[in-house]
């Protein structure tokens, strides 16, 4: 149950869950490749840890050429990849489907799903070819991979699709010792959830505040998933603020 010395890639590592998880991996002794679009924020996060084990690389995960470049850098620097936290994501304001601009749909789809596919594709290729063979891919799902919030067609659709990606990677990875799991997170405190305690639309039409949990708990859970031997896998984990509306949501 250790990630010390392992090579780990964290996407969306400049803020929120990705930032906290990258820091947790570094604290546990891993070599961490931190990627996001904003290099300056990645470098600030890495510097704050006081370790030299971080490699910061700017990358738009929805751009296939940039993703290919990212994996080339990882291969040149480390020669292998042990763990990926496929975390990068975004969202747009809530609206019923007929009020959602196509541009908003594509904005969410391109990062949350297409980007996750590109990262998983590159990781799978490295893990399949490297010696010793194998590795672990951990996809960031969501409570929305199970049940939607009102007006969340783009986000919910992509997160349901991530579950399909996770299941297929788990099956296709078996011959190559590539394990794939998913963590479904509910109301972790971050920039994206800063407004949750002020009130969110509920299924009955009301606006109500929702509890949040410390993002550190998410980071610790991901590190624990990553520390398992490849003979074991957390296929799905749901980690949520205890009192948030999920059980009996709506």
Image: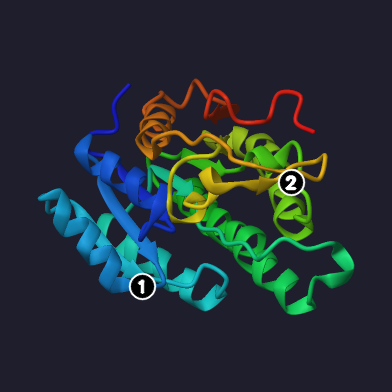
Q: In terms of depth relative to the viewer, which is nearer, 181 or 121?
A: 181
Discs 1/2, front? 2
The residue at 70%/37% (across/down) is 167
The residue at 49%/36% (across/down) is 212
Find residue 201 and report its horizontal and vertical position in percent: 71, 48
Q: In terms of depth relative to the viewer, which is nearer, 27 or 203?
A: 203
Q: In the picture provided, is 129 more to the left or to the right than 81?
A: right
Answer with the quarter of the image where residue 246 lies: top right
Answer with the quarter of the image where residue 105 lies: bottom right
- Is residue 168 visible in the rendered image? The answer is no
Q: Label 2, secondary structure: give it.
A: loop
- Few, some or many C-alpha atoms within 10 Å of disc 2 (few <14, some 14-19, many ≥20)? some
* Residue, disc 2: 149
Across the whole image, how many numbered discs are drawn on residues? 2
| Quarter of the image that includes the N terminus | top left
Q: CA distance from mark 1 to mark 2?
A: 29 Å
- Please say if 92 is above or below 244: below
The residue at 27%/45% (across/down) is 23
- Please say if 86 is above or below 138: below
The residue at 70%/41% (across/down) is 145
* Residue, disc 1: 38
| Quarter of the image that includes the C terminus | top right
């Amino acid at each position: 149950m250790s990630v010390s010395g392992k090579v780990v890639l964290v996407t969306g590592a400049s803020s929120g869950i990705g930032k906290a998880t990258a820091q947790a991996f570094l604290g546990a002794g891993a070599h961490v490749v931190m990627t996001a679009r904003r290099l300056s924020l990645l470098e600030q996060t890495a510097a704050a840890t006081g370790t030299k084990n971080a490699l910061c690389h700017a990358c738009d995960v929805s751009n296939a050429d940039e993703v290919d470049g990212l994996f080339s850098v990882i291969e040149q620097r480390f020669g292998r990849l042990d763990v990926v936290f496929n975390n990068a994501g975004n969202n747009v304001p809530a609206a019923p489907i007929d009020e959602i601009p196509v541009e908003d749909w594509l904005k969410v789809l391109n990062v949350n799903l297409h980007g996750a596919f590109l990262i998983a594709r590159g990781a799978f290729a490295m893990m399949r070819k490297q010696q010793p063979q194998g590795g672990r891919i951990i996809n960031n799902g969501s409570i929305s991979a199970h049940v939607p919030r009102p007006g969340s067609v783009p986000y919910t659709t992509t997160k349901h699709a991530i579950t399909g990606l996770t299941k297929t990677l788990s099956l296709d990875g078996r011959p190559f010792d590539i394990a794939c799991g998913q963590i479904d997170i509910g109301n972790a405190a971050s920039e994206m959830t800063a407004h949750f305690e002020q009130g969110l639309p509920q299924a009955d039409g009301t606006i109500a505040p929702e509890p949040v949990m410390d993002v550190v708990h998410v980071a610790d859970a991901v590190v624990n998933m990553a520390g398992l031997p490849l003979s074991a896998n957390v296929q799905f984990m749901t980690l949520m603020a205890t009192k948030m509306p999920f059980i009996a949501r709506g």
